[in-house]
Amino acid sequence: MSDDPMKDPAERLMVALDLPTADEALRMVDSLGNIVRWFKVGSQLFTACGPDIVIKIKGMGFKVFLDLKFHDIPTTVSLAGVSAAKLGVDMFNVHSMGGTRMMSKTVSGVSDFCADKGLKRPIIIAVTALTSMTGPDLNEIGIGGQAADAVKNLAGLAKNSGLDGVVASPEEVAMIKDACGEGFVVVTPGVRPVWAERDDQARAQTPFGAIRNGSDYLVVGRPILKAQHPADAAQRTLDEIAAAL
C-alpha cells in the first residue's frame, strides 16, 4: 500500500453535516464512522450548536473542516482563525473577497499561535466563487467576466497571501492547479455522484470527474444525508473516487 494518505479514497471525501441539530449530526457521524474520516461543519450546524459540535466530532476521532467562510476586517478574521485552531479543526476557510491583507494576517496569526502552542496548524483555504453562482450571478454583484475568470483571480490572491488552497468547483480545478501549482489544495463542493440529483449546484461534477480533474478533497452532503441508507451512499461515493484514483 502507498505511504501517500491521499491515495486512500477515505482521505478524499468530506461529508457535509448540513443538519439542523446536534443529535441528527452525531447520529450521522456515528452511522458513517466506519467509512468516513472527514466531516464538514458549516453555518447551519455551527449556528445551531456552537463550538461543542466540533469538540464532540473531534472527540470521536474524526477530522473536521470548519466551513464558516470568515469574511471581516483582518484582525477579526485572524482571531477567528486562532479560535478555530484552538478547537482543533483540521481545516477552515475564509472568503477570498476579504482581500490579501485579511488572508495574510490570518495565516500569520494562526501560524504563530500554533507554533507557540506546539499545535499542528489547520489547513487554511479560501472560498473563491460559490458553486451555486454562474457568470450572471457574479455580474449582478459587480464582478465582470465569466465565473472562471473570477475564480482564477481569487485563487491567485489566496496563494500569494500564503493560504494552502481554495474551495472551487470541479470545472475550475485544472485551471487553478495550472496557475497555482499541484501542491495548492483544491476542495471541491458541488460534487454529485452519478446516481444523485444536482439540486442547486450550477457547476457540479461526479466524484470520478472531480478527482480526475485534480481535486484533492470532495465535499458531498445531500446525496449521502438524504439517502435511505447513508452508509451505502457514502461507500458508493468512495467507490467512484477509488475508480478515479
Image (cartoon, rainbow, N blue to C red):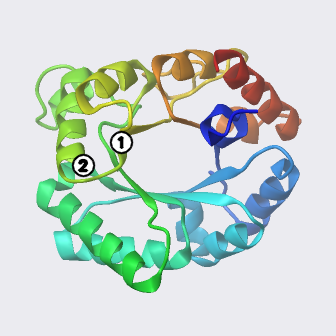
**Quick one: 187 or 70, which is closer to the camera?**
187
At x 55%, y 15%, the residue is 209
Q: CA distance from mark 2 to mark 1?
A: 9 Å
Q: Quick check: 168 above or below 14?
A: above
Q: Are marks 2 and 1 in contact (CB under 8 Å)?
A: yes
Circle 2: residue type: Ser
Task: Give residue 11's quadrant in the image.
Answer: top right
Circle 1: residue type: Val
Mark 1: few/some/many CA within 10 Å (<14, 14-19, 20+)? many
> For this view, does 140 lie left or right of residue 5?
left
Q: Position of residue 182 (x, y in %)?
A: 37, 30
Mark sitting on residue 197: none
- Residue indicated by mark 2: 96
Mark 1 or mark 2, which is nearer the start of the sequence?
2
Q: Is residue 211 visible?
A: yes
Mark sitting on residue 166: 1
At x 25%, y 75%, the residue is 76
